[in-house]
Image (tube, rainbow, N blue to C red):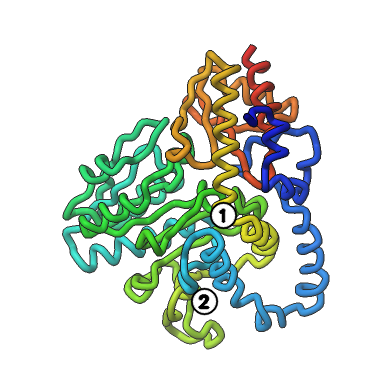
Amino acid sequence: MVTTAAELDAADPLARFRERFVGADTDLVYFDGNSLGRPVASAADRLGEFVRQEWGGRLIRGWDESWMELPTRLGDDLGRVTLGAAAGQTAVGDSTTVWLYKLMRAAVDHAVRTDPGRTEIVIDTDNFPTDRYVAEGIAAERGLTLRWIEVDTSTGVTADQLTDAVGECTALVVLNHVAYRSAWLADAPELTRIAHAAGALVLWDLCHSAGAVPVALDEWDADLAVGCTYKYLNGGPGSPAFGYVNTRLQGELTQPIQGWMGHADPFLMGPGYTPAPGMRRFISGTPPILGMVAMQSMLELVEEAGIDAIRAKSVALTSYAVELADATLPEVTLASPRDAALRGGHVTLHHDRMREVTARLWRRDVIPDYRDPGGLRIGLSPLSTSFDEVERGIAAVAEALR
């Protein structure tokens, strides 16, 4: 039976991808790929060529030749490779926070306009902070109520909990596909069905799943989704986020940040705003073109490897981390689902002194991250992480705890 790190790496069909990432050949243990992915080595050449050829060579002509369409063209690629979304429903640009605001606000405005009695946003207490903060702000702006689902920080929202929370007053449900703290993997098709049965729209936060866990937005009949590109999509610090709006809703929603790039004719420069048809209307300002360049390198690797194979490697990595923790960290408790089918791409280990452990590990080039209460989070990016790296990292955690 294959049990050692060396044997697991030798049997890994995706092991060949590791050498394509900057720094993967060093002794540093990187357990934070779900916060910031390693750079793809080819991105350096791609960025340099962009500066020399497209930016330096074509200058302002680049907008007419390709840049204007890049947010939706790259969005279509992202939808096809990682999101299970047909063309014309995804766009890249802005930050995660801005996309959350635009799509949450558009959704609740539509719901209230259609049915004034829909005055509630349903969201859980362990949803990512930005999602909660944006929802709080929109509720205050529109005179709405937040209905909180209380969840255990080691799990996530269940079907029974959502069924109890939604009703005829629900305008919008905001959910994480993979919980940022515990890695709980939500039953997205069932939760979407429950929200729709109550007459509500659903917004999925895909920040901790896009590029690591298969997503099927069209199959789920999802309404809206938002995600970032610097975690498992390796676009680099501050790389732009993406938004998804189901085709059936695009003509119904009014996006609240009306900028010139979402106008039907951006260069008309007319006195009033006329939204562009389709997904284009959800773009606001000038797209961050440079921030989209690096992500294309990772998207090509994801397509080459295949998202199902990436998920299989992710399950194997996190399962190995849990196995090692069980064997070598008796004083630590698992704060993530033990069943891999209920777990996303990371594992959280709990101990009261994990904040100190994390600081000690960083000083010796072992890089997890910390999340209260007492959680050391191990984010394993499947294409750039080896089983040997997991073994060395867990051994370093045990030493730091001692």
Q: Residue 390: give x, y in percent of width and height.
A: 66, 31
In the rendering, which numbered label is found on residue 273?
none
> Residue 248's x, y, as percent?
34, 72
Q: Quadrant of the C terminus?
A: top right
Q: Nearer the viewer, residue 308 or 268?
A: 308
Residue 214, percent from left and from top: 50, 53
Callout 1–callout 2 Cβ contact below 8 Å: no
Q: Nearer the viewer, residue 11 or 60?
A: 11
Task: Decide which of tag 1 and tag 2 comes sooner along the chain.
Answer: 2
> How far is disc 1 from disc 2 in space, using C-alphas?
35 Å
Q: Residue at x 63, y 56 (%)?
A: 302
Residue tagged by mark 1? 307
Q: Which residue is mark 2?
A: 260
Rendering quarter of residue 250: bottom left
Q: Is residue 105 visible?
A: no
Q: With respect to residue 390, does 59 lie above or below?
A: below
**SS type, badge 1:** helix
Name which quarter of the figure residue 42 lies in: bottom right
How many residues crowd around disc 2 within 10 Å: few (fewer than 14), some, or many (20 or more)? Answer: many
